[in-house]
Every structure is written in structure tokens, then in C-alpha cells.
Amino acid sequence: MSFVVISRFEDTSAGDLQEQGEAVAVFASEASAQAHFEARGTALASALGAARARDAGATFVTWVLLLRMPLEVGSVEEALEDLELVLEETDEVEDPFGELVVRFEGRRHAPGADAPLQQKDALDELEAWLT
């Protein structure tokens, strides 16, 4: 079994703020994926602080998602292809990733007020990105 950690760090007016290769990582064990999930969350919090210092009026979205893959995958490309297949083959149009989700954390960071980001909103973003 494989696990995939996917993250998002976006300035809602300027787009994705992640560096190439930061958004998706594949792991052979859940323990490794959980450790990366934690590290990625910490990195996003740090990056958010720096971005907020540069632009106090911006709105940012951050989320981290840990998925259990239905098939063994060996690379990021394979994981993304398999997730596309999940979208194409699922009967659960409203929640195509539902049973694959192991863990999720997300927030919307507006000037002066942070709020939780709903898992469904993040999964909708992921679905749009994959299609």
C-alpha cells in the first residue's frame, strides 16, 4: 500500500506559492507519510508567516491531505494518474476521494481572521487540479 501527501499554499489573488516538487510526495508506509504530513504543516505555517509579513492584506489558503492509495504507486506521476482514475471511475461524484482520506488539515487565512477550510473545499480544489 502507498500513501500520498498533497499540500496547497495559495494566495487567493496571486495563485500557488509552493515551490516545484513541494505539493505532492509518495510514501511506502503510513508512518513516513504521517511524519511528512506533520513536517509539511509546519513548513506551511512558516511560509504563511513570511507571506503575511510581505502582504498583510492578502488572503491565503493552506491545506495538507494524506491519502491511502487504492493501488501501490512508486512515483508522484503514478499517484496523480491513479487519482485521476479514481475520479473517472468513482460512483461517488460528491465525494470521490472519501474513503482514501486518512487525514486533513486546512485553513483560510484572511487579514485579521483565520477560519477552518472544509475538507470538501480542498478535495474540490484537488479534483479541479487533477482534471
Image (cartoon, helix red, strand yellow):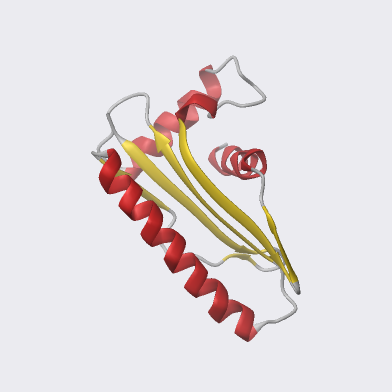
Indicate left or right for 52 with 29 as reference.
right
Q: Residue 84's spot in the image, x, y percent?
A: 49, 31
Quadrant of the image occupied by residue 108: bottom right
Q: Residue at x 57, y 26 (%)?
A: 96
Quadrant of the image occupied by residue 63: bottom right
Q: Residue at x 48, y 74 (%)?
A: 46
Q: Residue 91's spot in the image, x, y percent?
A: 59, 14
**In which quadrant of the rendered image does the N terminus lie?**
top left
Indicate left or right for 114 with 38 as reference.
right
Q: Residue at x 54, y 50 (%)?
A: 105
Q: Nearer the viewer, residue 41 or 61?
A: 41
Most extreme residue toward the top, as rendered?
Answer: 91
**In which quadrant of the rendered image does the C terminus lie?**
top right
Q: Is residue 62 visible?
A: yes
Q: Residue 51's spot in the image, x, y percent?
A: 58, 78
Q: Residue 77's spot in the image, x, y percent?
A: 35, 41
Count of number-bearing discs: 0
Q: Nearer the viewer, residue 62 or 21?
A: 62
